[in-house]
Structure formats: C-alpha cells, structure tokens
Image (cartoon, rainbow, N blue to C red):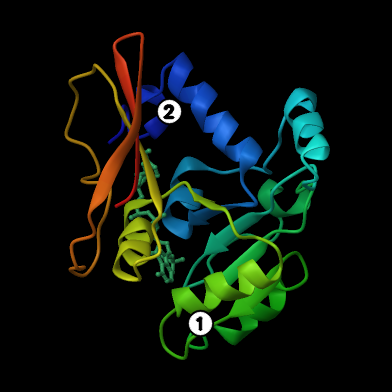
Amino acid sequence: MSVGGYSAGLSGAADKRVFGLVRMVCDAVMVGAGTLRHEGYGALRLDERRRSWRRAAGLPEYPPLVLVSSRLELDPGSAMFTDAPTRPVVLTHGGSPADRRRVLSQVADVLVHGDAELDLPAALAELAGRGLRQVLCEGGPHLLGSLTAADAVDELCLTVAPQLTGPGPGRITAGPPAAVRSLRLGHVLAADDNLLLRYVRG
Ligand SMILES: NC(=O)c1ccc[n+]([C@@H]2O[C@H](COP(=O)([O-])OP(=O)(O)OC[C@H]3O[C@@H](n4cnc5c(N)ncnc54)[C@H](OP(=O)(O)O)[C@@H]3O)[C@@H](O)[C@H]2O)c1
C-alpha cells in the first residue's frame, strides 16, 4: 500500500521506530530493484546509538544493502553505491546483462545464482556463508512473492495503519502463484491506532 505513491505516507512514529530497530538488528537489508528505483533508496545509514548497539552485539556497524535484480538497471553512480558505508551486494542470475554485471561489480559484490532466473535458496546460502543469516527484506511485492515461493520467509512484520486510501500498488506479494505458507502470530503492538503485527513461521 502507499499514500501518494510512496509507502512512507503510511508510516507513523511507532512503525518508523520498528523499521529502524529491525534494520539495527539484522545482518543485511534486502530490497528488490523495483522498490529501490521507485522509492529512491540512498545509502543505508544508522545513527550512532544504533551503531554502538551493533558494535556491542559483535556486529559490523552497518548491515550491507542486498539488491535483487534481473535487468540490473541500477545506476552505479547513485548514492546507494557511492555513499554506502558497507559494500552492497547485488543478487542476479546468469541471464542478466553481462556488461551491467561488469559495471556494477566495481561498486558492489555481484553474486550470480541460477541460469535464467535467480536461484534464491542458493543466493541466500551464499549470504549465510558470508555471515549474513538474518536477512531483512524491505520488499517489494515481487521480491516477497519470490521469497514466499522459495519458502524462505521466516517472519513477517505487518503494520495496519488507520488510513483509508487507494488505489494502491496492490498486495504485499506479487508474481507467479506460490504454495500457501502458514504463519502464527508472534506478537502484537498497538500504538497511535496502528497495529504492528509480527508473524513467525508456524
Ligand atoms: N508499503 C510498503 O511497505 C512497501 C514496501 C516495498 C515496496 N512497496 C511498493 O511496491 C512497489 C514496487 O513493487 P514491485 O513488486 O515492483 O517491487 P520489487 O519486488 O521491489 O521490484 C520488482 C523488481 O525487483 C527485481 N526482482 C524482484 N524479485 C526478483 C527475483 N526473484 N529475481 C530477480 N529479480 C527480482 C526485478 O528487478 P529488475 O526489473 O531490475 O530485473 C523486478 O522487476 C512500489 O510502489 C513500492 O513503493 C511498498
């Protein structure tokens, strides 16, 4: 969902806080190229308080951004690459444009898994081998649909905001049909008329 075309318009103070906290505790932040382009992602930053929490927890100061794309139409001169405090990772497959892979490999680690489409389980296994086990996916719907189809979603943080709006971009998953994956409600926070729901694998 979105307000004025952007998800930020839906997000109240509590949702922003949780958004920042899950970034603080994760090993990597994964985003689909459609969301990166639409939302205009910059370099991923955390404030000093959150960086010091990560240092105390034995984590690197910043989680890397993990970008997922087939077409690789990503500008290597954009801030998400040039200002990144940690070298980003690009996940793609062997059918993506080889020249774009070469260009992007100057500013990011480009990991190729799968011949004609991304082999997400293999890509996630390589991330885990690099110590990136808790991967926070910030969307969008096509990426979440692929992760659901690959049965790679362990938790879902879903915020219900008290705003009637529309039409929006659709549902939280998109793409080819995927098997039904059941989750159970882990906990509920209520703040300023918002419901912050955390579902976990059943
Ligand atoms: N409300 C919210 O919390 C929220 C959160 C996130 C996004 N959104 C909204 O969602 C909309 C974007 O939707 P979307 O479905 O286009 O987002 P998306 O999933 O981020 O982007 C789709 C693109 O990501 C890449 N991609 C995703 N899965 C892939 C896979 N398995 N293998 C290879 N590439 C993959 C492809 O990029 P290439 O085209 O480069 O190949 C694909 O075209 C925007 O309006 C955004 O604001 C809302």
Question: In the depicted view, which residue is nearer to us: 201 or 29?
Answer: 201
Residue drawn at (57%, 44%), measured in percent from left and top?
41
Q: Secondary structure at mark 2?
A: helix
Above or below, comparing residue 114 to residue 8 in the picture? below
Residue denoted by label 1: 93
Q: Is residue 92 visible?
A: no
Counting from the top left corner in percent of width and height, residue 124 is at 54, 70
Counting from the top left corner in percent of width and height, residue 191 is at 37, 12
Residue drawn at (51%, 82%), measured in percent from left and top?
93
Above or below, comparing residue 3 to residue 38 in the picture? above
Question: In the depicted view, which residue is nearer to us: 120 or 143?
Answer: 120
Residue 171 appears left or right of 147 = left
Q: Is mark 1 within 8 Å of ligand 1?
A: yes
Q: Is residue 16 visible?
A: yes
Amino acid at dot 2: Ala
Residue 108 appears left or right of 161 = right
Label whose residue precedes the other's in the sequence (2 or 1): 2
Amino acid at dot 1: His
Question: In the depicted view, which residue is nearer to us: 55 or 69?
Answer: 55
Alpha carbon separation for disc pair 2 and 1: 31 Å
- The quadrant of the rendered image in which ligand 1 is seen is bottom left
Counting from the top left corner in percent of width and height, residue 155 is at 40, 48
Q: Secondary structure at mark 1?
A: loop
Snapshot quadrant of residue 118: bottom left
Residue denoted by label 2: 8
Q: Is mark 2 within 8 Å of ligand 1?
A: no
Above or below, comparing residue 162 to residue 92 in the picture? above
